[in-house]
Structures are given as C-alpha cells and as structure tokens.
Image (tube, rainbow, N blue to C red):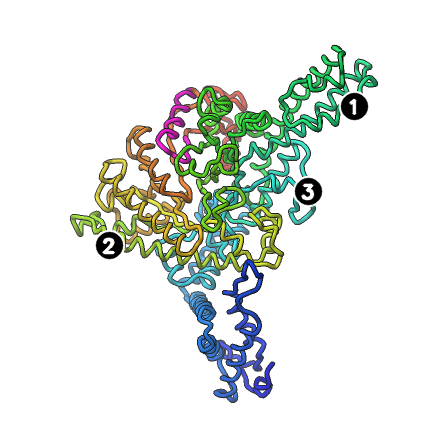
Amino acid sequence: MTEVEEKLELVVVKRNGKKVDFDGTKIALAIKKGFDSVNEQDEETGKYKYDDKDITKVYNEVIKAIEKNYTDKIKIEEIQDLIEVSLKKKGYEEVYVSFAEYRDRRAQSREMFIDDKRMHKFLKTIEGLGLKSASEDDTKRENANVDGDTAMGTMLQYGSTVSKEFAKAYLVKKKFSDAHDNGEIHIHDMDFLAMGTTTCMQIELDRLFKKGFSTGHGYLRPPKDIASFSALAAIAVQANQNDQHGGQSIPAFDYFMAPGVLMTFKKQFKQQISDYLDLEGLLSHISMDRVAREIDKLESINFSIEIFKPIYKESEQIERLFTKAYEKALAKTDRLTYQAMEAFIHNLNTMHSRAGAQVPFSSINFGTDISPEGRMVSLNFLKATDAGLGKGETPIFPVSIFKVKEGVNFNTEDPNYDIFRLSCEVSAKRLFPNFSFLDAPFNLEFYKPGDYRTEVGYMGCRTRVMSDVTDLNNQTTGGRGNLSFTSINLPRIAIKHGICLKERTKADMDGFYKELGETMELVRDQLLERFEIQCNKRCYNFPFLIEQGVWTDGDKLKPTDRMRKILKHGSLTLGFIGLAETLKALIGEHHGESEKAQKLGLEIIGFMREKANEFSKDYNLNFTLIATPAEGLSGRFVNIDRAIYGKIKGVTDRGYYTNSFHVPVYYNTSIKHKLETEAPYHNLTNGGHISYIEFDGNTAMNVDAFESVIRTMKEVGIGYGAINHPVDRDPVCGYVGVIGDVCPGCGRKEFDSVPLEEVKNFQCGC
C-alpha cells in the first residue's frame, strides 16, 4: 500500500447504490486479473511476460489519479475507467484490451439477467427440466448418452442450462453469443465453456499401463494379465470422460492389449507345465525355476517347443507334456482373452461418468496388429461384440473402428484378412465395427511402415486429429485431441446469395464467399477466445487428463502450471452442415444431381479448408475443418431458417439439413455414385468426416455384398465409413439385433402374441 493510498478517505459507490469504504487491495486484485488473463510463460526460461512490478506501476498510477480527482466518493465504473486509462498510458495494450472486453462482458451479463424476456425464457427452460419428461421436453434429450428422466440426468441438465447462460453472460463476446442464438453459427458444448474442458482424446494406454495410474481415489498398479489390461482400459476411459466434454478413443487397441495376452499366456504355461508334471510324478525331474526363467524370456505366444529341449533333454515323455501344456495354455489364454473383451464391452455399456448420469462415449481403433497376441485380441473382441450383451442386445459402446490397410488385412493373402472378413460379418449383424482406411491419400501421408503410432485413428463420431503444425516431429494421433469446434450454418449464407428466393437468376458467388469468409473469421476468433479460457486453466483442474499424462506431456507440468504449452497440440475446428441444401439454394441442384453442383460443392469446401489452413499459418495453431458430426444441429438450423425465410423447396422444406457433405438420403442413387461423390470431401475435411451407406434388408445374410461396399469405400478414397441397417428389438425379452422368424433371445416366433403386461413394461422402459 502506497503513501498516497493511506491518505485516501473516501467511499466507493457500488452499482446498486450501496456505499462501502475504499479498499485499495480490490483495485490491485482487479489489475492483477487483467495481467493474468494474458500472461504467458516462456517455455525456455520459465519466466512470465509480466510480473508484480508491472501490476504495481499501473496500481500506483490509478491511486494517484484517484487522489488527484476525487475527495469524498468514487463510483465503481470510474475506478474501472481509470484502470483502463492507466493501462494504455503505461503501454500495456493487450492487458487493456483484455480488461475492457471482460468489463463489457460483465455489463452484458447484467443486462441479460435484467432482461425480462430472457429471464422468462431461462426460467421456462428450468421449469421444463424439473417438471417434464424427456418425451415432452427436447432439452432433456439433447445428449443421447444422458438419461434426462433420471435424477442425476436432470441434475446434469440443470447444470448444463445454467452453465450455458453463464457462458453467454460472462465469457463469450456478445457478437459470438448473438451469432449462436440467431443460428448463424453453433458453438458446440457451450455448457462446458466455463470449465475450460477440451473435447475429445485419443488415449495411449501403454503410457498409463507402464507405471500404473491414479484416478484420484487410489493408485492402480500396472496390469499383469489380459483381464486387468481390459479392466484398466475401461477405467481409463471412464476417468478421462470426467475431465472432458467429448468422447474417448483408443487409437491402437489391439497393440495396447497384446502385452496382456503374452503375460496371461506365460502365467498359464507355467501353471500347466507344473500341473502336468505333477500329475505324472515328474515334477522333481525338472527345475521349475529354470522353466519360469525361460518362459519369462518369451516374446511371443507363437514359438517352437524345442526351445525348452535343454531343459527336458531327451525325455520324449516330458517333451510330450510340455507340448500338451503349451496347447492347454494357449487355449486357456484364448478363452481368458475372450472373457476380458466381453468384460470390456459390458463395462463400457454400463459404467457411468459425470455423477452417474452418462455412459462414456467410447471408441476403439484396431485391426492392424499382425502379432499372434494382437490377432487374438482383435478376433476375441469381434466374437464378444457378435455375442452381444446379457440378453443378446447389440452393444453400442465402444464404437469400434476397423483400420483397413492393404498388405495387412485388405487382400485375401494378407495376414489379417480373416479379421477383416470377421469384421464385415459382425458389422453386418451388429452395426459395428465401422471402417477407416489408412491407404486414403490424406491418411497414408502420415503412415510409416512398422510404426503403428503413425496410423490415423478416428473417434466414433468421426473426429480426426493427426498433423501438428506446432511440432512437426509429432505427426501422430495418440495423446492428442480436439480442443473445441463450432459449426457454420452454410445454407443460411446460400439462401441470402442464391437463386432460391427468386430475387436473382444467378447466384451472387462473390457475395457468398465474402460472407462465408467473414463468418469463418468470426468462428476463428470465437475459437481463439475459448482457447484462451482453456489455456488459463491449471493442470490441477484436470487431474486425470493432464496430471496422469493422458494428454501428451501433461505429466511434465506442475499442478499449478497453465496449459498453453501442451494444449497447443490439439485442434481448433470449424464445422459446417447442409452442403446439399447450400447447393440447392445457390443453383437449384445438389452435388448428387449434377457435375456442376459437385464442382461448386468442392469449390466451397475447398475454400473453407484453405481458410482453415491460413488460420493455422497465421496463429501457429491446428485449425482444421470438420464435416460436423452433430446430427441434432441439423434440425436447429433449419427451424430457425424456416422461421425467417419460410419453406423453400429443397432447402428448408424438411425437418433437417443434410448431414455435412452427404448426398441427401432422400435422393435415389447408387452406392458407388454416392461414395464417389462424397469421397473428395474426405480429403478436404482434415478435422473429421464419415460416409454412410443405408441398407434396408438383413445384411447378415449377404456378407459378400457387405464386404464389396467396404472395398468400394477404400477404392474411391473414403477416409472413414459405415454401413447402417435395421436393428430389431423384441418387446418381450429386450433382445436387440437382427431378428428373423424366431427371436434369438427368448425364442418367441414372429406372429406370437405379446402379453399385455409385457407390452406395458416394454413401453415404460423406452
């Protein structure tokens, strides 16, 4: 406290008119927060850009100004004005901007909560959450993983609603929240904005398994068999879900689980040798310590039993027992691996996160490990998926993604072709796995033979994180994720500048690109604003994601460190929706209907990708373009646009905008044409993409046709694809899957009557 301040005897008038004694420490704290909001630590020296001396300079300037101009009272706003003047006078321009923007947002928030209409809308939303069921209130169904009718689900929705309003009021610039509210853009997961959470993660399990890990309530030792590998994998997914607002994926599940298979086999082999020798009274003829040491040296479950010849020497009897022990150990390991995969699937469909109200959105990538151990994992995972859950239901999680790679599993002579074929069989019955294609040019450019970490991994929702402009030596998927993404209402811009309103005969493409560019710059600035919020969080805010080293280099930081130096490796993503309606609005045809429209569609998305690349170069951050995965958003945008422009044929006349760059589902076309039309957009959307094919019949009855579609996806350059087909549910036993004339779950025949009470129970459970 300065001598000048000690002489000040005045009161401060607060905004509500209340008068309080002057307290200089509050001014110092306000100034400090302004500096903290932009302060950066030098990665080499560890020193911060600003320190206490800078704060003191501004503080003394403010106190002198108060002493000179005020004698008995001063208003809060006047103090803040003096802080801004002093910051500019002392040359702290970026601190001034940050302080002024924060002040504006606080003013905006006060105005918002005084606004009767907005407060009424807010209270009506809260009322709906408390008094209505999910079938009556869309808000309670916003997240498919959250049961909005449960107590904890409703509590989450309360928190989400309040958090969104808080973010709009206090954290987001008015121009961003206005653009979101009027449907120009959609800021995804705004309810988590204040928490500074990142979206999703590709978890490298081997990092966690090497030394074990803590979930905050106890330390888990490194796993020693396939059962514990499986259990800890599920726990890692669950724990990390509590630190993020998006999904959790494992980029190389088969590779990460394979060591657990080998450990299990070694245990079983030792036990079986001991048991067989003991059974025939030969245990004393062999040194089991020596046997154990030799087994511990094994690097694979596939070997010749003759390596133990120096131990059993010329005894044919003991050699026979070793062979039997090997076969028995291999069979038991295979069975235990199946049980571990079964447990993994059951766990991820039942274990909850976020106050017990949500099943983690989980994904795994697999299929390229050709080792005997990796193959055993993949085969048993598929068999467990095929078997389904407790009543034969189709498991939704993890969303499994089979990585297709020529020379590994694509051709009949490839070592893992049998796993690819089984993947097709299982997917034809169970919807999963989906398929990613490592030979697509935009994925292949990162691939290094023999290094599975360079294989592109996808999230089940389609998100893709690969290249890293901040570290050219880290062009890998694992240990990274998406930071946040915001989507653009592409059809809205097209309606304004196209021919659909009959205001012109030719689209105003110059006007379209000008507005699209400006909207992308708006989204860029909004993503950067959110990035700053994320970077200013401390490592201790994310005890699993950061402190356990799930995010690359997180474990190298101190708990109190800010996170910019590691979060920069994630991606900031711009999304879009409704390319088909955009083209209809601009020229009257979508890209499935004509080459002209396809050419324009590629030009538009190419323009967006180029802008994202420019942002990456300008800011040295990973700006990417995603074909937006939020299907629910398609309804929100079109409802707003229909209210503004009315029903426009081919544009706003349906209840949704078409997902990303997809050819509309209502358009009758061939499978090959649809895939050939959509494939070039995969190359442009480096933040993520997917193409779907819809089948009407029972695909399990024609696996050859199913496989041929997957092969077509690979040949035309799709990055990530899936085949959707009908999945039935029996109203009596709850079996979910393909049901023919007889339900596999309960044996009920197709035309058997269903007891009324069971129908009621079934309906109540929906």
Callout 2: SS = helix
* 58 to 305, vertically: above or below: below
* 410 to 680, vertically: above or below: above
Q: State which quadrant residue 593 falls in.
A: top left
The residue indicated by pointer 3 is 220
The residue indicated by pointer 2 is 511
**Position in image of residue 160 (x %, y %):** 50, 53
The residue indicated by pointer 1 is 288
Q: State which quadrant residue 349 falls in.
A: top right
Sequence-wise, the earlier of marks 1 and 3 is 3
* Residue in front for this viewpoint, 45 or 368: 45
Q: Give the side of residue 302 with respect to residue 66, left or right.
A: right
Sequence-wise, the earlier of marks 1 and 2 is 1
- Predominant secondary structure in magenta? helix
Q: In this orientation, does residue 77 appear?
A: no
Give the foreground label among 1 and 3. 1
Tell me which amino acid carries mark 3.
Answer: Leu
